[in-house]
Image (tube, helix red, strand yellow):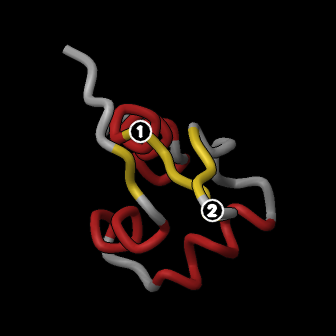
């Protein structure tokens, strides 16, 4: 099943327990996937996109 819920920087940060500024920095440095949607100039990602990104992060490989 696909989760089409959209997450903001704040949602992603809360999920991986980092500051919102850290997520913004990840995006600035190309470490975050492109947003799935942009609303009023703010980026959003589907939960499935975020979970796939988390699973592919070097610190999470082999877990």
Marking on residue 46: 1
The residue furthest top is 1
The residue furthest right is 29
Q: Residue at x 27, y 19 (%)?
A: 2
* Residue 18 position by quadrant: bottom left
Residue 59 in picture, x, y percent from top left: 47, 53
Residue in front for this viewpoint, 40 or 33: 40
Is residue 34 left or right of 2 when viewed as pictured?
right
* Quadrant assignment for the N terminus: top left
Badge nearest the viewer, 2 or 1 = 2
Residue 21 in picture, x, y percent from top left: 58, 84
Q: Local crowd at mark 1 within 10 Å, few (<14), some, or many (≥20)?
A: some
Total count of labels: 2
Is residue 56 left or right of 47 when viewed as pictured?
right
Give the residue number, with chain letter if any, for mark 2. 40
Examine the rendered structure and indicate whether residue 53 appears above or below residue 1: below
């Amino acid at each position: 099943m696909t989760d089409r819920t959209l997450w903001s920087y704040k949602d992603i940060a809360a999920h991986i327990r980092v500051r919102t500024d850290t997520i913004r920095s990840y995006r600035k440095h190309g470490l975050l996937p492109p947003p799935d949607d942009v609303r009023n100039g703010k980026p959003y990602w589907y939960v499935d996109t975020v979970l796939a990104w988390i699973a592919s992060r070097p610190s999470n490989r082999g877990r």
